[in-house]
């Protein structure tokens, strides 16, 4: 997906205050993104498991389960750890923000929210999110290509290794047993055969 096309993305908004949910929902819609919401960390985790969002706006201080606990659980799960989390906080206490980032939070914005700042931070995190997915997809494709290459190597070895070895052995035997009986042109044929078999063998090794 293209981060410059907001309609392709769904953002989960997590806040315990209804007025904040409404405000954020309106902003997200104006930015062009789809959105869903939860009122605490516990609901957020259930929402993520049901319908995996592309980004989470997560309030830091909430009842039932706060943002730090929610982030910790999501980042511990390999199915969801790559989802970017932007913390929303009215707290200016440095220890809370540091803890949020230590637990895997990707960014944060302070309340009251600034519209352009929020939009920029969302876009930046979605761009990084797409880059991570592309890297993972590339790694997967390389892994599959490696597997196919190994299979191809095995096939080449099975189909060509033994026949080539047999031909080379036959040439060797002929060179040992027949030289007194061969004229120069016949010897040349044997030498050429040996050279051509070696070329084929080298070509297979290079191809592999």
Image (cartoon, helix red, strand yellow):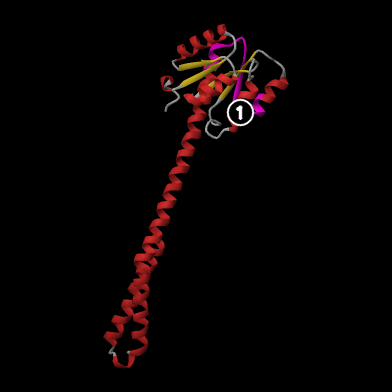
Residue at x 43% of width, y 56% of height = 150
Q: Quadrant of residue 166?
A: bottom left
Secondary element at tag 1: helix
The percent position of residue 84, horizontal first and vertical second, equals 55, 26
Residue 180 visible in the picture: yes
The question of residue 105 being in magenta is answered with yes
Name the residue that disc number 1 marks: 73
Q: Going by the image, does 193 lie left or right of 70?
A: left
- Which corner quadrant holds the C terminus? bottom left
Residue 126 lies in the magenta-colored region = no
Question: Of residues 23 and 189, which is closer to you in this image?
Answer: 23
- 177 on left or right of 70: left
| 165 with respect to 35 (left or right) | left
Q: On the picture, is 120 further left or further right than 194?
A: right
Judged from this view, the residue extending furthest toward the top is 19
The residue drawn where x is 61% and y is 9% is: 112
The image shows residue 116 at horizontal and vertical percentages of 53, 13
> In terms of image quadrants, where is residue 197?
bottom left
Which residue does the image show at 58% across and 21% down from the upper left? 42
Give the quarter of the figure containing the N terminus.
top left
Instruction: Tell me the magenta residue range.
Output: 100-119
Judge the density around disc 1: few (<14), some (14-19), many (≥20) Cα neighbours within 10 Å.
some
With respect to residue 104, does 185 lie above or below? below
Q: In which quarter of the image is residue 91?
A: top right
Q: How many marks?
A: 1
Q: Which residue is drawn at 72% across and 22% down?
A: 95
Q: Does residue 208 appear in the picture of this structure? A: no
Please state the horizontal and vertical placement of residue 68, each as a whole percent of the image.
Answer: 65, 23
Viewer-proximal residue among 69 and 109: 69
């Amino acid at each position: 997906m293209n981060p410059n096309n907001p309609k392709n993305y769904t953002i989960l908004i997590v806040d315990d205050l209804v007025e904040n949910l409404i405000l954020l929902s309106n902003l997200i819609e104006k930015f062009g993104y789809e959105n869903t919401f939860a009122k605490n960390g516990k609901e957020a985790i259930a929402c993520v498991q049901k319908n995996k969002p592309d980004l989470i706006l997560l309030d830091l201080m909430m009842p039932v389960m706060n943002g730090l606990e929610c982030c910790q659980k999501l980042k511990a799960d390999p199915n969801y750890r790559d989802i970017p989390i932007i913390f929303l906080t009215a707290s200016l206490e440095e220890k809370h923000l540091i803890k949020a980032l230590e637990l895997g939070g990707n960014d944060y914005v302070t309340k009251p929210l600034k519209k352009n700042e929020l939009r920029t931070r969302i876009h930046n995190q979605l761009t990084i999110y797409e880059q991570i997915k592309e890297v993972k997809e590339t790694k997967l494709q390389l892994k599959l290509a490696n597997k196919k290459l190994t299979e191809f190597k095995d096939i080449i070895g099975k189909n060509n290794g033994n026949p080539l070895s047999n031909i080379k052995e036959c040439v060797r035997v002929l060179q040992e047993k027949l030289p007194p009986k061969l004229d120069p042109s016949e010897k040349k044929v044997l030498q050429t055969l040996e050279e051509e078999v070696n070329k084929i063998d080298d070509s297979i090794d290079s191809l592999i």
